Amino acid sequence: MRRFITRTFRRLDSGQRGFTLVELLISVAIMAGIGSGLVGALYQMNTFTSRGVAQLATESDLRISMQWLNKDLQRARTTDLADGGLPVVCSSMVTSTPCVTFTWQNEYEGVSTNHSASYSLVGNELLRTFDSSTHAVARRVEDVSFSQVGKLITVTMTSTDEGWADISKEFTHHFFMSSS
């Protein structure tokens, strides 16, 4: 060990130079600049990814809820909407009171079975109650409105992500109820 220390100091004494304090400070400053640039870039990538995920979730909620509405309205024979009346608007202030109900009847081997599907907005969840069984068909729903003219049902829905106030999608879709 003593021999190693002696040899190391002897090399420094024989004219070899190390880094000066100024050189070390400059290299640390350069590394800090590079590091902060990398951290900033990673933060931007994370933010961009989070926004993209929020947009996809918002659009997915609208798409899935419209699929459920389409399924129910293809079978529906009647609704509790006023034909030609003002739209029924459900907002997140409404508590579990159905905004709209669609009814139909299935016949299988001569036996008729009545069915209904109701939609309500509780908080930011659009709930579908089918024959007394309730489940959420969409989250992040701000409001939804239903109107009817003849067999044409118009649904307008707004979905907003809570974490990103500027990510909001509104979608209007027209459905035709079954004619028979």
Image (spheres, rainbow, N blue to C red):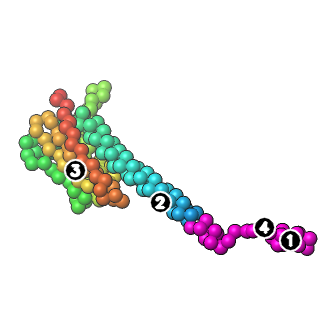
Please give the name of the residue rendered at 53% of the width and 63% of the height, measured from the top-left corner.
Answer: 33
| Residue 109: % across, % down | 31, 26
Going from N to C along the chain, the mark reached first, 1 or 4, is: 1
Reading the image, the residue beneath label 4 is: 16
State the image quarter where residue 172 is shown: top left
What is the distance, in whole Å, between disc 2 and disc 4 at their CAs?
39 Å
Q: What amino acid is at disc 1? A: Arg
Quarter of the figure that contains the C terminus: top left
Disc 1 crowd, CA 10 A, few/some/many (<14, 14-19, 20+):
few
Dot in front, 2 or 3: 2
Going from N to C along the chain, the mark reached first, 2 or 3, is: 2
Q: Which mark is residue 10?
A: 1
Q: What amino acid is at disc 4? A: Gln
What is the distance, in whole Å, between disc 1 and disc 4 at their CAs?
9 Å
Residue 109 as seen in the image, left or right of residue 14: left
Q: What amino acid is at disc 3? A: Val
Element at label 3: strand
Quarter of the figure that contains the N terminus: bottom right
What is the distance, in whole Å, between disc 1 and disc 3 at their CAs?
83 Å
Q: Which mark is residue 144?
A: 3
Which portion, as a residue range, is magenta?
A: 1-29
Residue 29 as seen in the image, left or right of residue 54: right
Q: Please say if 133 is above or below 44.
A: above
Dot in front, 3 or 4: 4
What is the distance, in whole Å, between disc 3 and disc 4 at their CAs?
78 Å
Does the segment drawn in magenta span residue 8? yes
| Residue 48: % across, % down | 41, 52
State if disc 4 and disc 1 touch (CB < 8 Å).
no
Disc 3 crowd, CA 10 A, few/some/many (<14, 14-19, 20+):
many
The residue closer to the viewer here, 174 or 163, is 163
